[in-house]
Image (cartoon, helix red, strand yellow):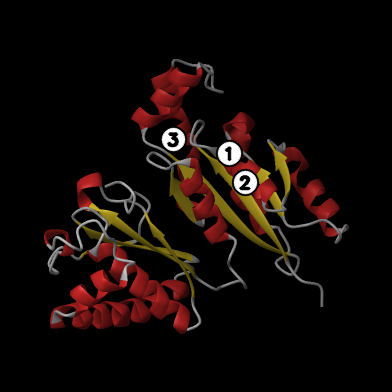
Amino acid sequence: MQKKRKLFIITGMSGAGKSQALKMFGDLGFYCVDNLPLALFQDFISYVTQHPELPDVALGIDIREGERLKELPSLLKKITKEDFTAKVIFLDASEECLIRRFSETKHKHPLHRKLVAAIEHEQDLLKPIKIASDKVIDTTDLKLGELKEKISALLELKKEGEMQISVVSFGFKNGIPKDTDIVMDVRFLPNPYYVKELKEKTGLDKDVQDYILSFPQSQDFADRFADLIKYLIPQYIKEGKSYLTIAIGCTGGKHRSVFMAHQLAETLRELGLSASEFHRDIELW
């Protein structure tokens, strides 16, 4: 039986990083086409289906298609599921961020209106696609390396219906990550920052981990939280969710949240789940 290929539709707001995302898919071995006219969508899918030697596919489709974008959801429903696993990735960013990016690059918005009006109109046009997408990535505060890590995590799905879990540590003083599904605050745990010999280390260092675990509430919390996540995963899968991002925060994002995120990711991997970890603020101190 021929292996199903992946088909990713990369869409979203102009200025949110779609071109960079599509380039990353290309770097990862995908057959990429940017700005494919939707009028040619079904012909393109037929062509790819008839050429099994082609790799997985990533298509960039955005507001340049204008009103025809409304056809995208119905076109995706026509794709034969025996041939493809199709996912829609929507890149978004705050209005302030988009204005700043257009101002810095001096690029014109594809809708050729005054910038703020163009962004607001684009948000309205793309709202149905955003709601129906499989994954929304907010790039407002993301560096290119962080975006690539998120895309790489998406590609670790081994079969249709398998959930890809991302566990992120962060510091509340730097803000909560935007595209998260579950946020947990571990600032109630004893803080290694106030122990002189541990202050400059991180939650990935064994002596920091030993210090945190020397308090009974630490392992008790880790076990209870892991049990909650294990309970939630099949519930989310039943609702059709393929990606789950869990953010664990402490004050600075260097000690407690790092260790708890690392331990949760390890626990999930031991259960055979596809879980990656990312420590957003570990190098900021």
Residue at position x 82%, y 54% in the image: 48
Pointer 3 residue: 124
Horizontal side, residue 184 vs residue 21: left or right = left
Amino acid found under the numbered disc labelled 2: Met
Determine the secondary structure under disc 2. Answer: helix
Which sits in the foreground, 274 or 233? 274
Determine the secondary structure under disc 3. Answer: helix
Amino acid found under the numbered disc labelled 1: Gln
**Residue 142 vertical placement versus 64 (above, below):** below
Q: Is residue 234 visible?
A: no
Pointer 2 residue: 24
Horizontal side, residue 62 vs residue 42: left or right = left
Whether residues under marks 1 and 2 lie with C-beta atoms below 8 angstroms apart, the answer is yes
Check disc 1: other Cα within 10 Å, few if <14, some if 14-19, many if 20+: few
The answer to which of marks 3 and 1 sits earlier in the sequence is 1
The image's mark for residue 200 is: none
Whole-number angstrom distance, CA of label 1 to CA of label 2: 6 Å
Q: Nearer the viewer, mark 3 or mark 2?
A: 2
The image's mark for residue 20 is: 1
The answer to which of marks 3 and 2 sits earlier in the sequence is 2
Residue at position x 54%, y 73% in the image: 162
Residue 56, given in percent of the width and then of the height, sits at 73, 57
Amino acid found under the numbered disc labelled 3: Asp
Whole-number angstrom distance, CA of label 3 to CA of label 2: 27 Å
Q: Is residue 152 visible?
A: yes
Residue 79, given in percent of the width and then of the height, sits at 71, 59
